């Protein structure tokens, strides 16, 4: 089963949170629905700045533990290696998620043509 390791931050980049989940879109929705769960409104975690997709649960857990030990400088370095401008990746991820769901729905609804 695939797992995602992600780093999420607030709008001022004061807090960097490393997480592990199996459904990244659902997890980001949870953060949006519960904005003050971890911090007050000013520091709510709402910007996805880094993520990795790993297909092996054990490897994902090891990678999560490894990234969780990183200092802030190390986390910033890994973010900048793939997202130099710290762009919020949520919009692109949601677009991809909806496009994939639409493709699956369309292929399921297509009638099967049998040749006679």
Image (cartoon, grey):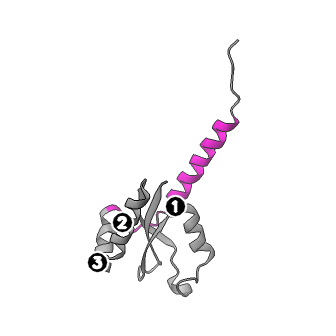
> Regarding mark 2 in the picture, which secondary structure is present there?
helix
Which secondary structure dominates the residues rendered in magenta?
helix
The residue pinned by badge 3 equals 73
Judged by depth in the image, the label closer to the viewer, 2 or 1, is: 2
The residue pinned by badge 2 equals 62
Disc on the earlier residue, 3 or 2 = 2
The spot of residue 69 in percent (x, y) is: 33, 77
Let me know if residue 106 is in the magenta part.
yes
The spot of residue 39 in percent (x, y) is: 52, 86
The residue pinned by badge 1 equals 22
Let me know if residue 105 is in the magenta part.
yes
- Is 67 positioned to the left or the right of 2 in the image? left
The spot of residue 65 in percent (x, y) is: 37, 71
Crowding at label 1, few (<14), some or many (≥20) Cα neighbours within 10 Å? some
> Regarding mark 3 in the picture, which secondary structure is present there?
helix
Judged by depth in the image, the label closer to the viewer, 3 or 2, is: 2
Q: Quadrant of residue 33?
A: bottom right
Vertical placement of residue 110 versus 65, above or below: above
- Is 29 positioned to the left or the right of 13 in the image? right
18 or 102, nearer to the observer: 18
Where does the magenta region start and end?
A: 82-109
Disc on the earlier residue, 2 or 1 = 1
State yes or no: discs 3 and 2 in contact (Cβ < 8 Å): no
């Amino acid at each position: 089963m695939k797992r995602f390791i992600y780093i999420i931050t607030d709008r001022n980049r004061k807090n960097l949170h490393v997480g592990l989940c199996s459904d990244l879109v659902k997890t980001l929705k949870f953060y949006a629905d519960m904005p003050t769960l971890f911090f007050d409104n000013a520091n709510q975690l709402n910007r996805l700045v880094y993520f990795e997709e790993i297909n092996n649960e054990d490897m994902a857990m090891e990678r999560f533990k490894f990234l969780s030990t990183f200092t802030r400088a190390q986390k910033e370095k890994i973010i900048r290696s793939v997202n130099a401008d710290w762009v919020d990746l949520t919009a692109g991820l949601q677009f991809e998620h909806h496009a994939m769901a639409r493709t699956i729905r369309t292929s399921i609804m297509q009638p099967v043509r049998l040749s006679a």
